[in-house]
Amino acid sequence: MRYKLEMKGIDKSFAGMQALCGASLTLREGEARALLGINGAGKSTMIKILSGVYTRDAGEILIDGKPRQIQSPKDALACGISAVYQDPQMVESFTGYENIYLGSEGPSRSVFSPINRRRLRRAALELVGRYPFDIDVEKPVYLMSSVEREIIAILRALSKNCKILILDEPTSILTEKEKYILFEFVHTLKQQGVSIIYITHHLDEVAQVCDSFSVFRNGRVVCHEDIRDGQVDSDYIAELMLGERLSQLYPDRAQDAAVSPCLNVRELTMDGKFENISFEARRGEIYGIFGLVGSGIDEISKTLFGAMAETSGEILKDGQRLSLSSPGQAIRKGIFLVPGNRKTEGFLSGLEIAFNITIARLDKAVGRMGLINRRREQEDAGELVKKLSIATPSLSKKVNELSGGNQQKVVVAKGLYADADVYIFTEPTVGVDVGAKSAIYETMRSLSRRAAVIIISSEPEEVLGNADRVMVVYKGRMTMEKAAQDTTLKEMLVHAISNGEVTQE
């Protein structure tokens, strides 16, 4: 069989660390192949070699059966290879069509000729007309939805005669409706002969858009398989990725744990977002809040952390009423939030790991003269990096240079350093792999032995798998509260989509 792409025996090491060892990959014309693996398994290194960001140490790359030397992104583009990474970069004030042709300024343009915007617009409209969606390319990017931005980024790749398209976590910030639009786009691209490498942590997406998958583990590819009948065995894939079954992902609940009240929320209301939310979070257990996107759960978490103001109701900690006007005040009162959007809310991306971990409680690392004790900071941060198994060669490494899973672990480490009494984890595992999920869940359970832990998530299995007690929110209202052992995923979903009302058969 002749393949569109063959990568054979690829080796790559960094400073003596073997990132890839004899890794191989094939891709047929019009095929979508998922790359799966925990953070650090080698899949990101593989696509960066293919897209020219890294050069390989050994092995070969063949396009249409011919060997290719890809030593730069320019070389990759010349081979018809383009990558669309998570959160694609755009010039916000430019229109869609200007962003599509940014850097090339349209087909057949001389370097000395002025930019012809009329021609750019016409070329963009012609390009859009090939696909099953309606998008206004004359609209500025800052007015576009998340899926429109993703489409513009893909169109930019296609405008460069792309035949092999790399999609890296393309749905990370999309709603379910937006995902459907993107998936239709992907299916159309496949029908037109575009070959796709699809990287995701969501196995349901693999079943919907991919024809095959490859599993990476410890720098090697341990499995290549075709997908039959749109079915993907989650347990089987998890076992390939980790060497263990998916059922082992969630830590055991504490049996007969001593619980004591910590946080009481009474009739908490924010007009237009949620109303009359009441619950008790206790030391010794994990309290779960589940709701679909738009149900009000995000606003609830931010109100508990002082980032948004309630209209009415009250929050009490250890019997004392709190009046929280800012996250800083919440931290001083012993409440810490691990946010769902780590990139904008969780850390300072351009600063080093050690500083990001200690920033919430710099007072703990301050010396006698009021200056930060760097030695103390490094020791404290190093201890937490080791405890959470954050993969980094140095504490001075910038957080934005880490993988998504390790970035989230840095945010968790910051929370541990804050030494809070109440921890709120909002969508704690968005965009992280199975291995990182397991580590975060274990940390949550460990924290619950001394603090009140609240997990707020739109993933029902994540809430039910971790929590001891569960609340469900529908359109800003609490529709159910039960012990986790007394409910099911089906019951939670019914209360999350229909206020618990079901049609009797």
Image (spheres, rainbow, N blue to C red):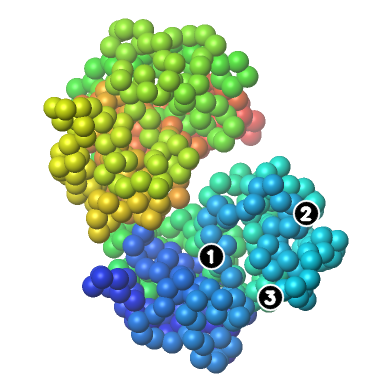
Secondary structure beneath dot 3 equals loop
Q: Residues within 10 Å of mark 1 (few under 14, many from 20)?
A: many
Q: Name the outermost residue toward the front.
A: 112
Secondary structure beneath dot 1 equals strand
First in residue order: circle 2 vs circle 3:
2
Q: Residues within 10 Å of mark 2 (few under 14, many from 20)?
A: many
Q: Would you name the residue on which mark 2 appears? A: 137
Q: Is residue 269 left or right of residue 242?
A: right
Asked whether the residues under the numbered discs 3 and 1 touch, taking CB atoms below 8 Å apart as contact, a structural biologist would say no
Please, is residue 368 above or below residue 48 in the view?
A: above
Q: CA distance from mark 3 to mark 1?
A: 19 Å
Q: Is residue 149 visible?
A: yes
Please tell me in which quadrant of the rendered image residue 485 appears.
top left
Q: Position of residue 415 (x, y in %)?
A: 30, 34
Give the camera-side residue of 46 and 325: 325
Q: Residues within 10 Å of mark 3 (few under 14, many from 20)?
A: some
- Kindly identify the amino acid type of the residue bearing the numbered disc 3: Asn
- Disc number at residue 161? 3
Asked whether the residues under the numbered discs 2 and 1 touch, taking CB atoms below 8 Å apart as contact, a structural biologist would say no
Q: Is residue 224 visible?
A: no
- Kindly identify the amino acid type of the residue bearing the numbered disc 2: Val
- Disc number at residue 426? none
- Kindly identify the amino acid type of the residue bearing the numbered disc 1: Tyr
Q: Would you name the residue on which mark 1 appears? A: 198
- What residue sits 50% from the left and 62% below the top? 199
Give the camera-side residue of 134 and 68: 68
- What residue sits 30% from the left and 47% below the top? 353
Q: Position of residue 235 (x, y in %)?
A: 39, 58
Q: Position of residue 371 (x, y in %)?
A: 21, 32
